[in-house]
Amino acid sequence: MSAAHAGDRALIARAAAHTRWAKTADRAAATAAARRTALERFEREVDPDGILEPHERARRAESARKAYFALLALKSAQARRANRGA
């Protein structure tokens, strides 16, 4: 794709994603491995040595996940504010 048409990449990617999901019968099954991997990341973050009880590790991982997405939302809001001011 040439640099002149770089703006088309997002539209092409969006169309490809819609095509994929149109052909997928079970979305939850298709994304299960990715969700499991993401949760494992937070579990490793809160219990790198694997010493916590499973329920405690899960509770802490859920808090770490919520904190991550809250900070992501903050950064997004700040970027939108900065773009509005530009």
Image: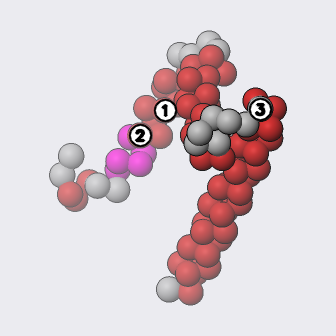
- Residue 27 is situated, as x and y percent measured from the top left of the image, at 63, 21
Name the residue: 58% across, 42% down.
48
- Residue 68 is situated, as x and y percent measured from the top left of the image, at 65, 55
Do tag 1 and tag 2 residues touch (Cβ < 8 Å)?
Answer: yes
Task: Tell me if 20 is positioned left or right of 7 in this view.
Answer: right
Do tag 1 and tag 3 residues touch (Cβ < 8 Å)?
Answer: no
Task: Tell me if 73 is positioned left or right of 19 in this view.
Answer: right
Q: Find the distance from the CA under tag 1 to the CA under tag 3.
A: 39 Å
- Residue 40 is situated, as x and y percent measured from the top left of the image, at 60, 34
Residue 31: image quadrant is: top right
Comparing 42 with 70, the one in front is: 42
Stretch of the chain drawn in magenta: 8-12
Please tell me how crowded label 1 is: few (under 14), some (14-19), or many (20+) other residues with Cα within 10 Å: few
- Is residue 71 positioned above or below 41 on the image? below
Looking at numbered disc 2 in the image, what kind of residue is underneath it?
Ala
Disc 1 marks which residue?
17
Please tell me how crowded label 3 is: few (under 14), some (14-19), or many (20+) other residues with Cα within 10 Å: few
Q: Find the distance from the CA under tag 3 to the CA under tag 2.
A: 42 Å
Looking at numbered disc 1 in the image, what kind of residue is underneath it?
Ala
Disc 3 marks which residue?
53
Name the residue: 73% across, 37% down.
52
SS assignment at label 2? helix
Q: Earlier in the sequence, mark 1 or mark 3?
A: 1
Looking at numbered disc 3 in the image, what kind of residue is underneath it?
Glu
Disc 2 marks which residue?
13
Do tag 3 and tag 2 residues touch (Cβ < 8 Å)?
Answer: no
- Is residue 49 positioned above or below 83 on the image? above
Q: Would residue 31 be visible to someone looking at this image?
A: no
Task: Tell me if 48 is positioned left or right of 56 in this view.
Answer: left
